[in-house]
């Protein structure tokens, strides 16, 4: 599955890992050594995340039920708790720098295909 920004036409990730079960949402990216630049983790449902037991920074996209970005956290460092936002129903975790590289902004609409 791929992740496309419908508003910019930018491809955010070629390979989407999906975390929908309790266990996969709990584990997330914990204990992984890195997140390749062409990969992302899509967590649903999800209102907020943490980076405990991670060894690298990530960019975080908070999405509403229509896959519109309602908030962005860039370069979230290991061992931190991310912010929560009232409209967030799912989250996408990307490698750090991907938001800036792709000019992704709040209000952009995403498509999983």
Image (tube, rainbow, N blue to C red):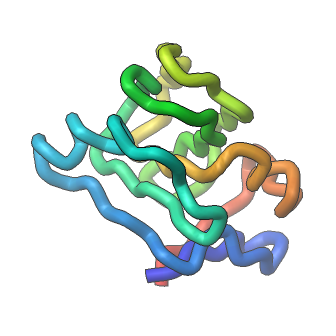
Residue sitting at the far left? 22
Q: Is residue 83 above or below residue 102?
A: above
Residue sitting at the far front? 33
Identity of the residue drawn at 61% across and 66% down: 110
Q: Residue 55's x, y, as percent?
A: 51, 32
Is residue 111 toward the left or the right of residue 89 in the image? right
105 vs 57, nearest the viewer: 57
Q: Residue 34's x, y, as percent?
A: 52, 49
Residue 61 location, quadrant = top right
66 vs 97, nearest the viewer: 97
Q: Residue 66's x, y, as percent?
A: 49, 59
Identity of the residue drawn at 11% across and 42% down: 22
Label count reads 0
Is residue 26 toward the left or the right of residue 21 in the image? right
Q: Residue 109's x, y, as percent?
A: 66, 63
Q: Is residue 60 above or below residue 80?
A: below
Identity of the residue drawn at 21% across and 54% down: 20
91 vs 59, nearest the viewer: 59
Residue 1 location, quadrant = bottom left
Q: Is residue 16 above or below residue 27?
A: below
Residue 19 location, quadrant = bottom left
Identity of the residue drawn at 40% across and 21% down: 52
């Amino acid at each position: 599955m791929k992740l496309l920004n419908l508003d910019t036409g930018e491809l955010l990730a070629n390979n989407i890992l999906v975390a929908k079960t309790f266990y996969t949402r709990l584990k997330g990216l914990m204990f992984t050594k890195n997140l390749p630049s062409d990969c992302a983790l899509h967590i649903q449902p999800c209102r907020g995340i943490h980076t405990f037991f991670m060894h690298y920074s990530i960019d975080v996209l908070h999405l509403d039920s229509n896959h519109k970005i309602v908030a962005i956290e860039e370069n979230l460092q290991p061992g931190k708790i991310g912010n929560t936002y009232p409209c967030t129903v799912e989250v996408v975790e990307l490698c750090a720098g991907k938001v800036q590289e792709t000019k992704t902004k709040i209000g952009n609409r995403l498509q999983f295909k």
